[in-house]
Image (cartoon, coloured by chain):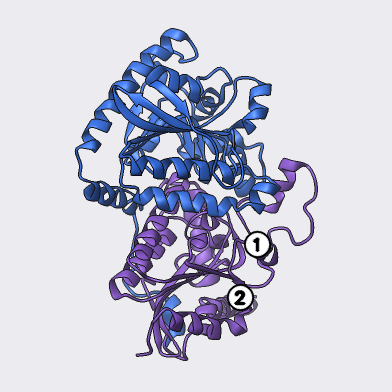
Amino acid sequence: MAKKEEISAYKRVQIARHKDRPKVNDYVEALFDDFVELCGDRLARDDKSILGGIASFHGIPVTVIGHRKGKNLEENVKYNFGMASPEGYRKALRLMEQAEKFNRPIITFIDTPGAYPGMEAEENGQSIAIATNIAKMSGLKTPIISVVTGEGSSGGALAIGVSDKIIMLENAIYAVLSPEGFASILWKDSKRVKEACEVMNITADSLYKFGIIDGVVREEESITTKDGFEKMIRELDSLLIKEITSLNQKDKESLVNSRYEKYRHIEGERAPVLNIGEASKWTD
Amino acid sequence: MNVFSNKRKVLLAYRKQRTKNKMLSMTGRRLKFVSDAGTFKEILGNFKFNNPLDFPEYDEKLNENYDSTGVNDAALVGIGKIKGIDFVGVELNKRFLMGSMGTVVGEKVTRACELAKEKKLPLIIFCASGGARMQEGMFSLMQMAKTSAAIESFKNSGGLYISILTHPTTGGVSASFATLGDIILAEPNALIGFAGPRVIEQTIKQKLPEGFQRSEFQLEHGMVDKIVPLDEMKEQLYKLLKLHGYKEI
C-alpha cells in the first residue's frame, strides 16, 4: 500500500487517460446482462460519444449511460474522443427521464476530457444542454449512481454526474477542467500541467477526503490486465449492488431531498465577516 | 526626503481609495438601475471568501481583488422593488476574479433561490462570468449542481426566474443557473457560450466568424428570448413581472 501512495496526481492523469484502460463497453459487458443500446435524442441526431441503454444488473433492470471513448484512433474519431455535443446530453436526459418513468435506477460511467468545444456544439446550445441535465438530474425520482472510471472533466462530466452516490476508481481523476486547460487559464501557460495536477486535488483519495465523492474502488493491479480488471470489477460490482439496494429502499421524496441536501452542503468553509462589508454602503 | 515619501504615500492611498469608491459605485449597478430609487438592499454582504483547497497564492489574489473592488466576492444578492413589485436580485461582478463561481458565489445564488421560494418573490439574476473559479477546483464544479438544483426547486414551486445574460457569460455559469431561466434575456452584443472563442478556435483550427456566440447569434439560434438594452430593462422586467401576476405592494 505504501508504494501506491507515491503515485503522483500527474501519473494518475496519464493512467486515467491511457488508451488501454477499460472503456464504458468493457464495464457494460462485465457488470450487466441483456444490455440493449438505445439511440438518439429525438431532436436532431444520435451522438455516439455517449452510450445509453437498458440492462439487467443482478436481475434489476437499470438504465446505463456513459461517455464513450475508443481504444484506437479510428474508434476515437467515431466517438469524438468522449467529448459529447448537446445531442449526446439530450439523449442522456431522455433516457434518464425514461428511467424515472419505469422506476429504473440509473448508473452512469464518467470518462471524458470535457464537453466538445466546437462551433456546432455552441450553435446547438451546449450550455443549455448541460445546465438542463444538471438541473433535471437533481430532481429525478429514481436512484442515480455515477462511477468515474477514467478522466472526469468539467461540465461535460457533471452533465451525467449529479448523483446520490459518486464512486471513483483509485486511478481515475475528477476535475473542474483538464489540467492543461487549468494551467492555461490560470497561468497562461499550458506547459505547467504537472504543477497543475499537484495543486488541483483531482485524485480519488483527495476528493474522498474533501467529501466530494462517496467511495473509492481500489485498483490492486493494473486494470489494463484481465486479472486486474476482474478483481476491480468484483469490488465495484459488490459496491454498486449494495448502494442500489439501499437507495431502492428509500421513498422517492426522501431520495430527492437527500440528493438536494448532499449538493446543498458542498460549500467548503465560509468565513463570514462580522460587520457588514463596505460593499453594502451604496444601498444607503 | 521624508516629506516627499509621506506625500507620495498619501497620494497613493488617496488614489487607491478613489478607485475602490469608483468600483464600489459600479457594484450592482444593474440592480440599482432597474430598482426603484433607494429600494434595493443588499443581503449576505458579509459572506467572505475562503480557500477550501488551500490553493497557493489564492488568499493573496482574493485580498487583491477585495482591495481593488471593495467587495467580498463576485456575487451581490439583495431585495428591491421594480415599480413597486418586490423581487430577489443577484448580480455577478466581473471585476472580481472575472465573476467566477466558487463556493461563495454558489452559496449566495442558492440562498437567493431559497429566499425567493420562501417569500414567493420573483428571482432576477444578472449574469456575467468567465465560469467556474479555478482555485476552488471540484468545489467550484459542484456549485453548478448546487445552484441548478436550487433554481429547479424554486421554479418547481411556481416561482418566476428571469435570467439576464450580460457580457460575458461563459463556462460553468452559462452551463448552470444562467441558462435555466423561465425567461432568458440578454444585453446586446454580450458574449454567451460554453467554451470561450479561443478554445474553440484552437479546437477547430480556424477563425470564428464575426458575431459568433454574441447575443444576436444566440437569439437567432433560439437560446435567448429577447435582447434588451439596459435602459429598457426596467420597463421590460416590470411588464414580465406583471404578466406573471406579481403585484405592487
Q: Chain of mark 1?
A: B
> Whole-percent x and y of residue B126?
52, 71
Give the vertical position of A156 relative to A14 (above or below): below
Q: How many marks?
A: 2
Q: Earlier in the sequence, mark 1 or mark 2?
A: 2
Do we see residue B50 in this rendering? yes
- Quarter assignment of residue B169: bottom right
Q: Depth check: A193 or A215 in front?
A: A215
Numbered circle sitting on residue B75: none
Residue at x 27% of width, y 26% of height: A241
Tell me the CA gap for discs 1 and 2.
44 Å
Q: Which chain is blue?
A: A
- Quarter assignment of residue B219: bottom right
> Whole-percent x and y of residue B65?
53, 64
Residue at x 48% of width, y 10% of height: A225
Give the vertical position of B100 relative to B28 (above or below): above
Q: Which amino acid does the dot numbered 1 rest on?
A: Gln
- Secondary structure under the numbered disc 2 in the rendered image: helix
Kindly identify which residue carries mark 1.
B218
> Whole-percent x and y of residue A82?
58, 33
Q: Are marks 1 and 2 in contact (CB under 8 Å)?
A: no
For label 1, count other residues whose C-alpha is less than 10 Å away and answer few (under 14), some (14-19) or many (20+): many
Q: Depth check: A99 or A212 in front?
A: A99
Kindly identify which residue carries mark 2.
B12
- Secondary structure under the numbered disc 1 in the rendered image: helix
Q: Chain of mark 2?
A: B
Q: Which amino acid does the dot numbered 2 rest on?
A: Leu
For label 2, count other residues whose C-alpha is less than 10 Å away and answer few (under 14), some (14-19) or many (20+): few
Do we see residue B49 in this rendering? no
Q: Depth check: B130 or B59 in front?
A: B130
Residue at x 41% of width, y 58% of height: B147
Q: Which chain is purple?
A: B
